[in-house]
Image (spheres, grey):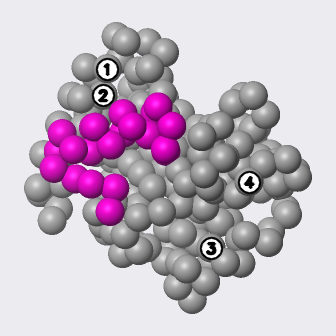
Amino acid sequence: MDITLLETQFQTWKGCPLSEKANPVFGEGHFSASVMFIGEAPGEQEDKLGRPFVGAAGKFLDELLSSINLKREDVYITNVVKYRPPANRDPTDLEKDQCMPWLKLQIALIKPHVIVPLGRHALGHFLSKVTISNAHGKAHRLTDSVTVFPICHPAAALHNGGLRQALYDDFKALGEFLKTVN
């Protein structure tokens, strides 16, 4: 199976109640990317366009990627939850659990060497015993071939300007780390 076939199968999936009122947002990017960015759930613009990280947080993510000489086409970008929660509320644990098999399949097919959870909802799946405030900007070995490198969600900096520099610093650290694994 490849990622395109998986996405085709996903388009008809109705295993999450959010699918009744929101559009599916599967993921996009390089199908054999060594780096995968995982957010929490689509927002309003993502729901409208069916693409991850295309709203204000996505524009900031593009800027952050550019700061370490990466483009969206170089990486794979997705979310834990594949549908927009109403009014952009946080996804529930049930919604995350319902969508998790799809994320696991995406990871299995793309086989990234570095997984970058953006924010606490994405981080919880990979490192459940740490908080994003303690884990961000540091490499955490998950397996012999996969490292998790948590970073705060770009949307957090849009709401709290004080986090903006921390995100740039974390991306700089990610860029330095990537030089050691590529």
Q: Earlier in the sequence, mark 4 or mark 1?
A: 4
Residue assigned mark 2: 167
Q: Determine the residue located farthest toward the front in the rendered image.
A: 49
Up the image or down, 166 lies above or below 45; here it is above
User: Which secondary structure lies at badge 4?
Assistant: loop
Could you tell me which residue is drawn at 62 percent across and 55 percent down?
Answer: 50
Range covered by the magenta-colored residues? 53-73
What element does badge 2 sit on?
helix
Disc 4/disc 2 C-alpha distance (Å): 29 Å
Q: Is mark 1 in CB contact (under 8 Å) with mark 2? A: yes
What's the distance in space between the residues labelled 3 and 4, CA to CA? Answer: 13 Å
Residue position marked by numbered label 1 in the rendering: 164
Residue type pointed to by label 2: Leu
Mark 3 vs mark 2: in front: 3
In the rendered view, tell whether residue 167 sits above or below residue 92. above
Closer to the eye: label 3 or 4: 4
- Provide residue 74's location: percent of width, then percent of height: 28, 63
- Residue type indicated by callout 4: Asn
- Magenta region, main secondary structure: helix
Say which label, 3 or 4, has the lower sequence index. Answer: 3
User: Label 1, label 2: how many angstroms apart (C-alpha)?
Assistant: 5 Å
- Label 4 environment density (alpha carbons within 10 Å; few <14, some 14–19, many ≥20): some
- Label 1 sits on a secondary structure element that is helix
Which residue position holds label 3? Answer: 7
Seen at 34% across and 10% down, the residue is: 162
Residue under the point 22% across and 53% down = 70
Distance, label 4 to label 1, CA atoms, is: 30 Å
Q: Earlier in the sequence, mark 4 or mark 2?
A: 4
Q: Which residue is mark 4?
A: 23
Q: CA distance from mark 3 to mark 2?
A: 30 Å
